[in-house]
Amino acid sequence: DTGVSQDPRHKITKRGQNVTFRCDPISEHNRLYWYRQTLGQGPEFLTYFQNEAQLEKSRLLSDRFSAERPKGSFSTLEIQRTEQGDSAMYLCASSLGMGQGGGTEAFFGQGTRLTVV
Amino acid sequence: AQSVSQHNHHVILSEAASLELGCNYSYGGTVNLFWYVQYPGQHLQLLLKYFSGDPLVKGIKGFEAEFIKSKFSFNLRKPSVQWSDTAEYFCAVNTYSSASKIIFGSGTRLSIRP
């Protein structure tokens, strides 16, 4: 399967613990996105990368959240000191950006479902 | 800031009925537009996309959407729905720039009565 893969698929953690999720995008895609989705809502933008550069981070994202894409390939999303409100599905997507304005649609992974107890 | 509005939160139709789901976006410049579908228990999949050219776009599974620039709209249509179209549908937009995130609407849940 050469699609976007996310690991783990499910994570249950106690409040206050740190968690880290991994995303492996489609290999030739230079753009990588992180979204959060709660029940009955659309994907909410968290942050995105073009190659290894983090170009934008949502103002809704607290300082407890950090994302990296060190070599422009896979990415990690870390949540420190988790809270019950962090419970959600965390989605990763990738796309091929082709310079000024060009690009393809985003392809999504299956997501990581986080439950904070 | 760009945003996407989907007017219908939950639509219930019988099989063979026609479907139209509304989507409006707020951004004055050139945009790329998408409709994604999420079937129960599955990941988001692209239904169709508009980048440029013919404003009437045809996608998979008999869906189509029309981009009306003057109305900032990109409504999704299907002439005859099937029970298998039961899913959540999301409209999304990104602006035509070299560094642009994709913004999603809140989604429309479509339920088809067999």
Image (tube, coloured by chain):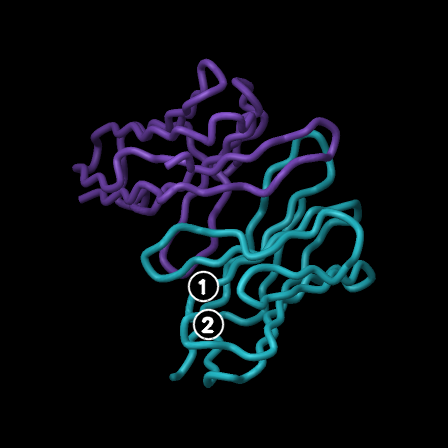
Chain colours: A purple, B cyan
Quarter holding the N terminus of chain A?
top left
Element under label 2?
strand
Does label 2 lie on the same chain as label 1?
Answer: yes
> Residue B110: which numbered mark, if any?
2
Q: Which residue is at a point 67% across and 44% down the rendered structure image?
A: B1
Coordinates of residue A105 in the picture (x, y in percent):
59, 43
Mark found first going from the N terminus, 1 or 2: 1
Chain letter of mark 2 equals B
B92 lies above or below B97? below
Hey, what amino acid is under mark 2?
A: Leu
> Residue B24: which numbered mark, if any?
none
Coordinates of residue A10 in the picture (x, y in percent):
23, 42
Hey, what amino acid is under mark 1?
A: Glu
Element under label 1?
strand
Q: Are marks 1 and 2 in contact (CB under 8 Å)?
A: yes
Quarter of the figure with residue B62: bottom right
Considering every residue shown, the one lying at the far top of the view is A71
Chain letter of mark 1 equals B
> Residue B88: which numbered mark, if any?
1
B29 left or right of A93 in image: right
Q: Which residue is at a point 55% across and 51% down the rendered structure image?
A: B104
Given residues B71 and A98, the one toward you in this image is A98
Quarter holding the C terminus of chain A?
top left
Q: Which residue is at a point 34% across and 35% down the rendered structure image?
A: A6
Coordinates of residue A9 in the picture (x, y in percent):
26, 40
Q: Which residue is at a point 23% across and 45% down the rendered structure image?
A: A115
